[in-house]
Amino acid sequence: MLLQGLNVETIRQISDLKQEDSWVKDYRMDSFQSFNKLDLPKFGPSYTVDFDQVIYYKNDKLDPIKDSWDEVDDRIVHELDDLGVLESEHHLDGMGVQYESEVIYHNMIEELQKKNIVFTSIEDGLKNYPELARKYFGTIVSNKENKFAALNGCVFSGGRVIYIPPYTKLDRPLQSYFRISSRNMGQFERTLIIVDHDSELHYVEGCTAPNYSESSLHAAVVEIYVGENSKCRYSTIQNWASNVNNLVTKRALVDTNGTMEWIDGNIGSNVTMKYPCCVLKGDDSVGTCISISVASNHQQQDTGAKMIHLGKRTKSNIISKSIAKNGGNATYRGKVSIGKNAFDSEAMIKCDTLILDNISKSDTIPVNICDNGSSFIEHEATVSKISEEKLFYLMSRGIDRERATELIILGFLEKFREELPMEYAVELNQLLKRNL
């Protein structure tokens, strides 16, 4: 089954294939109306999307989701094994894999079931947990706020529903892995995460695609609710091919004394526009975003974060590390807003960019707003090149120039790497070595 071109019939066919309830189909149609009314974003890098040429749904076999690799198509298993996906499962409490438009593999250890944790595809989540879905789905990210959120609302397929019950903690992360393998393919996963009060979750996401001359589109939506006294960490390492336009909307709503952490790595893609957001609704809530962006070969990485302070004594921390080389453009774009009733709140933004040649570029475009006199915002930004003195010091110790440069870059990104589990930090090092 392959559906190309955006229209009412395509949307209806996707909904019918998934045997969705009427309220989900109505949401898709409402999103399509919003999509037709909204313009492309008027800020950020230039790019083109021919919505009539995008493949919005592709699935060769409408088989049930597998829970054993022995039941998955051998060609796909070998492809994912070469990428290290199968090996990474040994370090996790549960894993889901999406290939093109559908989740093809899902597995979770028995402990998750005993704890009444929900870790399932978005399709099964909407069907089997309708009260949970209708309470949160589409409420944290509106289908009317930007064209690509509306697009996702029309044609979303695959993704996750995760629910962590009260007083529940996991020892290891849950993971989802997303793979695009077709020309002109669009991927529109939808993730909904609810971490109920007094609970914790670490969720890891990986994304890749092969490189084709025809552009692909990735327009995901992530909605996260963090309950009272709870903590959620969402770690992403995306290595899309250089033909993928990566246009994503991610937002978390954080309740009283809750903590949300975005650990966001962007290495591949043609254009990336991604600004993970924390809405600090509850008093004493905390939001953090630690991100890296690597822009090479004329890639445009337009990334950053948004922190919206509504509750009293809220705190936010944004650390952005960017590298530009070979004509790449690594831009930080962010917004911090401390509301008039968010008394005694604090925000810190630190943006550092390393430019490796004379043809690359970096911009810092912050919007910082503080609407009360008892709160404060600190912003620091640096742009630098690799120090010849540091290179000379390392080379005088017998290290060649290429290896010395690599060590300086890895040190520059240390703050991000130290936030990852060990096996993912190792994977990140390998990705960086291939892309620098």
Image: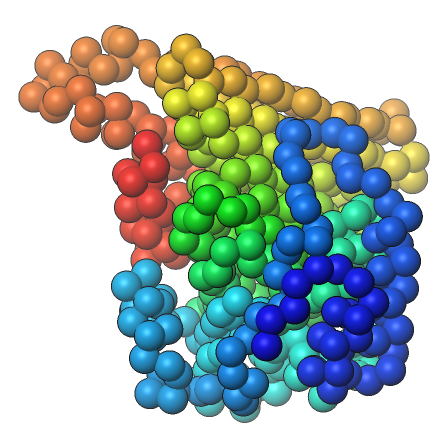
Question: Dividing the image into 4 quarters, which one contains the N terminus?
Answer: bottom right
Percent from the top left, x then y, of residue 29? Answer: 87, 67
Quarter of the figure with residue 434: top left
Residue at (40, 34) in percent of width and height: 413
- Say left or right for 33 vs 101: right
Q: How is the image coloured?
A: rainbow
* Identity of the residue furthest to the left in this view: 398
Quarter of the figure with residue 318: top right
Is residue 29 visible from the viewing direction of this image?
yes
- Say left or right for 387 vs 55: left
How many numbered discs? 0
Residue at (52, 38) in percent of width and height: 270
Nearest the viewer among 422 and 222 is 222
Residue at (75, 60) in percent of width and height: 6
**In the picture shown, does residue 244 fall above or below 364?**
below
Percent from the top left, x then y, of residue 272? Answer: 58, 40
**In the picture shown, does residue 120 fall above or below 6?**
below
- Say left or right for 390 vs 56: left
Percent from the top left, x then y, of residue 249? Answer: 70, 50
Is residue 152 visible from the viewing direction of this image?
no
